[in-house]
Image (spheres, grey):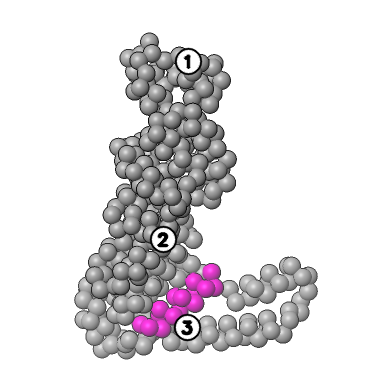
Amino acid sequence: MVDYALDIYKSVHGTEAPPPDMVARRADVIARLGALQAAAAPVVAFLQDEAAVRALGQDKAANLAHLQAAHGIGPPQVAALYHYAKFQFECGNYGAAAEFLHHYRALGTDGGRVLAAMWGSLACEVLLQRWDAASASVARLREVIDADAFAPPALALQRRAWLAHWALFVFFNADGGRAALVDLLLSDRYAAALQLLAPHLLRYLCVAAVVTKRRRATLKEVVRLVDQEAYQYGDAATAFLRCLLSSHDFEGAQARLAECGPLLAGDFFVASLAGEFVEAARLLVFEAYCRVHARIDLGALADRLGLEAAAAEAWVVGLVRGARLDAR
């Protein structure tokens, strides 16, 4: 890993001789790696003994006393494991970093470092695309943040905003993640963090709520939150829901829906959901239109859906057949 930067330099510049400062940095990295390996060696060797690791209990103090007596592992070695894991992360060795951080969380007694290790574990799981493990990390962090009654309110708010942003990486990839994102951002504490620090998260809340059918019941709450924050944030996705479900403005909803496709297609988190969002949004328009009209003209409905008349008729017929609606 320490030669990675030199390999990149050679491939880019086509020369075998990097500048002196790069050579000096490489020597410094090698020296740091050697020092950290030596400091963490006792605890790393212990962790390779699976039977010994499984024998540890839940009491950290008792575990440390046992490790000190039986293996010569004390707080300095456990602290060295934390620094070694951090160094592995900085070098891009995320698998090793995740493993060492997991063990540090089980052994470490420094609350600040244990929390930092939890954030590091989440970052590793995201970078490794281990979405189930990342979802578990989000849940653990949420539990720890919410349980810290002594944290200053501003710090607790900031931590929740951080977690909400990290959750975007996880919940737009994990199975069932969209519903989990809606639940997270609509919970009182995280809704407050959204309103005060990150109103731009409303876009992702709207997308997740629209494409998750079993969370449609929460759309009223989503629209209420979007209405409250309209003075400081708005985009095509939030405007679509406001027009359709708050103002009942079908023409405005149609115009905003036409803008949603390009907007979402250019968004890192929801680019893959752009088509799904537009399809689900059309279904919302259809449902809302049917609720306020006893008789529906397919031409007018096509305009509302942003489709050609023939395409709108085929879409409605498919919808009626698929949902087995009693319609004529």
Three-letter amino acid code at the position of disc 3: Gln
Q: Which residues are magenta?
A: 78-92
Distance of label 2 from label 1 (alpha carbons):
44 Å
Q: In this picture, is 274 found above or below 43?
A: above
266 within the magenta span = no
Rendered image: mark on residue 146: none
List x then y, in percent, for residue 37: 47, 83
Rendered image: mark on residue 197: 2
Distance of label 3 from label 1 (alpha carbons):
71 Å
Q: Is any atom of residue 272 visible in this view?
A: no
Q: Is any atom of residue 267 visible in this view?
A: yes
Dot 1 lies on which element?
Answer: helix
Q: Nearer the viewer, residue 276 or 250?
A: 250
Task: Identify the mark nearer the N-term, 3 or 2.
Answer: 3
What main secondary structure does the magenta stretch of the protein show?
Answer: helix
Mark 2 vs mark 1: in front: 2
Name the residue at the top extreme.
328
List x then y, in percent, for residue 78: 35, 82
Q: Report which quarter residue 146 is drawn in.
A: bottom left
Rendered image: mark on residue 37: 3
**Which residue in the protein does label 1 denote?**
298
| Residue at 37% over, 26% down | 287
Three-letter amino acid code at the position of disc 1: Leu
Task: Identify the mark nearer the N-term, 3 or 1.
Answer: 3
Mark 3 vs mark 2: in front: 2
Q: Is residue 29 left or right of residue 133?
A: right
| Residue at 29% over, 80% down | 109
| Residue at 40% over, 34% down | 247
Q: Crowding at label 2, few (<14), some or many (≥20) Cα neighbours within 10 Å?
A: some
